[in-house]
Structures are given as C-alpha cells and as structure tokens.
Amino acid sequence: MSCDGLGHGPMAAVAAQAAVQAFRTGAARTPEQAMEQVHRALRGTRGAAVAIARLEPDGRLLFCGVGNITAALVTTTARSSLLSHPGIAGHRMHQLRTYEYRLPVHGVLVMHSDGLSGRWSAPDLAGLLHHPPAVIATGLLGHAGTRRDDASAVIAKAAW
C-alpha cells in the first residue's frame, strides 16, 4: 500500500496512520476490499490518496488506486502506468475496481506520492532494477523528489 494523507502536517499524518492501521489489521482478500476498509477507516479524517497492490506467485498483479498515487510497471525499457480512480479515500470515491496486470519479467512495480515528479522514465531506473527495492526507491527519490513536498515510494518485485 502507498498512502499520502491530504495536505501537510499532523492532520495529514493522522489520515495516513489510520490508513496503515486499517490495511494492516483488515481481513481483505483483494485490493478493492482493502480499499473499502481503508476508506471506512479514513472517514472523519482529511482523507488520502491510496494505492493498493497485491503480487501473486504466478506473476499477476492486482491493483486498486484512488487519487494521485502514481503507479507503474517498469522494465529497463518501458514504463506502463496503472489505472487509478479519481477521488479521496475517506471522503468520495467512485465505483472501485481491482485491475489485473502482469508483472513483467525483470520488472518492478513502482508506486509513489505526488512529492515525486512524474517526469521520470524507465531508462532513469534501468541501472537500478537489479538491486533490492530499497535501493531502487532511494534512486527514484533522488532523481524525481521535489523539495517542496513530502515524498514516499514503494517498490515491489518478484525474486529474480
């Protein structure tokens, strides 16, 4: 899960913490169900942009996103964006849907908040993809991070 509480400061942190708690303690089986649990937990907070992904052992990726969390499947040569719904978890969301994708061989899932510029490309990460996810996230934060906003990045990949 990647979550960015709306706005800045303590109230945004309260929303993000509520989302993390709901995600960790929920019994959802799909990203869509997890998003519904997070949405209920965020009522009464500022709300958040949230993206939830589940990697299956067979290489399928199940994804549900609400708001402006950037999500993409990345290889050394291509970046393919994942579909996210407009809205704010905790306030207003349209009909949710879990989308199914295939994690590319030697590819990674990248999810990040709007504290990173979306102006990065697959070649910007190509030399990092064989490294552990934390190294890829650090490289992305260094390359695309903006100094005016908080930033987060989630990287997931299969063992290869």
Image (cartoon, rainbow, N blue to C red):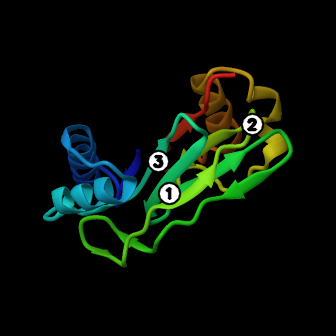
| Nearer-N-terminus badge (3/1) | 3
Residue 115: image location, x then y, percent: 53, 50
Nearer the observer, 54 or 137: 54
Please state, as top left, top right, bottom left or bottom right, where the C terminus lies in the image: top right
Q: Is residue 63 left or right of residue 157?
A: left
Q: Which residue is mark 2?
A: 105
What SS does tag 2 mark? loop
Of badges 2 and 3, nearer the viewer stands: 2
Marks 1 and 2, how far apart in space? 23 Å
Q: Residue at x 39, y 50 (%)?
A: 3
What SS does tag 1 mark? loop
Q: Does 15 appear above or below 106?
A: below
Name the disc covering residue 53, or none. Answer: 3
Q: Which residue is mark 1?
A: 69
The extreme left residue here reads 44
Residue type indicated by callout 1: Ile
Nearer the observer, 81 or 119: 81
**Crowd band around label 3 with a 10 angstrom C-alpha radius: few (<14), some (14–19), many (20+):** many
Image quarter for residue 91?
A: bottom left
| Nearer-N-terminus badge (2/3) | 3
Residue 25: image location, x then y, percent: 19, 39
Marks 3 and 1, how far apart in space? 12 Å
